Image (tube, grey):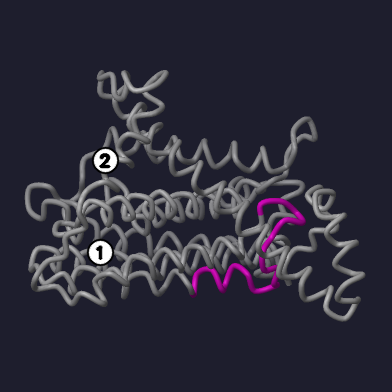
Amino acid sequence: MAIDITSQPVASYFSYFYAKLSTIVGGALLQPLSLLLALVVFAVIIGVVVGVFAYLFGWMERKVVARVQSRHGPTYVGKFGILQNLADIVKLLSKENIIPDNADKPLFLLILPLVFAIFVIILGFLPLTGSFVGINTSWGLLVVFIALSFTPLLLFLAGWTSGNKFSSISAQRSVMILVSYEIPLMLVVVSVAMLANGYGLGAIVAAQQSRWFVLAMPLGFVVFFMVMLAELERSPFDLREADNELIAGWLTDVGAPYFGLALFLDYTRVFVGTLLMALLFFGGWLGPAIVPGFVWLLLKVVALVLSIIIIRATLVRMKIDRVLKVGWIYLMPLAVVNLLISFILFVR
């Protein structure tokens, strides 16, 4: 069920509109329109949050990686280089969107918007506070990972439809990695649901009132964190962009505007992944009442993002055989052990 904006602070902005609307259309139509308006408000807020996050993440990644590697990073455009990403966005959007001659043009142009749509749908199931959620269901966590399971197929199509063999090889690598890490991911998800006694994301956060799940099952968090690095195609699992072999992977032949959309999609995926980790293992919006719960959630997301960036700056890219070996030989047994530990805790 969508959020009811009448219970939110934003309701004050629409009170006059509601009063006039009720006199015009009557109570019978007011509830559906209220639902539609609530969804629109939710979509706008989520869009702003993701847009701001993507912009700041791009800047922060460049600055932190530069600092770790004793460089300056963006410096001249704006204070501390904060406007450098804006300049890059303008540059990318001002260039021609070139489509390869051998590409399957309709599918080639459709794939990235479809992947982006999947992550927008996922965001609709992720609560930002106890009451601010687009679709509140007791099966929210399961729906999220069912939606994530479509990503490998779409990424394969993204490389295959370009008509470039290097892009196709890159897409095949991405699919092999994602499939290898799906099973450990689901085992950890089942462990979390077992401790929370349900798949509702709100219930999972509420179950962490006394103790975060990262403390109850640290092994599960380590497995989940490594799996999410692979799912997000972040270092050291970023074989999609093996520079010495595949250049930019399945993005090799795309034009500048499409490449900008792919970058924004990557940042959106990181936001979704870190948001999931914060909800499942760090108590979500729970924290001392000195700041709102939404702020606590964002602080936890930022901390997780920093850890992902530092890993990128310090670890080298793994070879494909080692990446698959980590997934099947190491993470799979660890996920099973974590499931058994969670079962023991659940029985007690």
Which numbered marker is on residue 91?
Answer: 2
* Magenta highlight: main SS: loop
Relative to residue 202, is residue 339 drawn left or right?
Answer: left
Identify the image quadrant of the N terminus: bottom right
Q: Quadrant of residue 117?
A: bottom left
| Mark 1 in CB contact with mark 2 (< 8 angstroms) | no
What is the three-letter code of the residue carrying label 1? Answer: Ser
Residue type highlighted by circle 2: Lys
Q: Nearer the viewer, mark 1 or mark 2?
A: 2
Q: Which mark is residue 119?
A: none
| Horizontal side, residue 65 vs residue 250: left or right | right
Tell me what residue is drawn at x 34 percent, y 38 percent: 311
Taking depth in this image into account, of 333 and 51 the one nearest to the observer is 51
Q: Nearer the viewer, residue 221 or 329?
A: 221
Q: Which residues are magenta?
A: 128-146
As for residue 145 lying within the magenta part, the answer is yes
- The residue sitting at the bottom extreme is 28
Coordinates of residue 221 in the picture (x, y in percent): 51, 51
Relative to 66, residue 48 above or below = below
Marker disc for residue 174: 1
Image coordinates of residue 52 in percent, x first then y, are: 51, 41
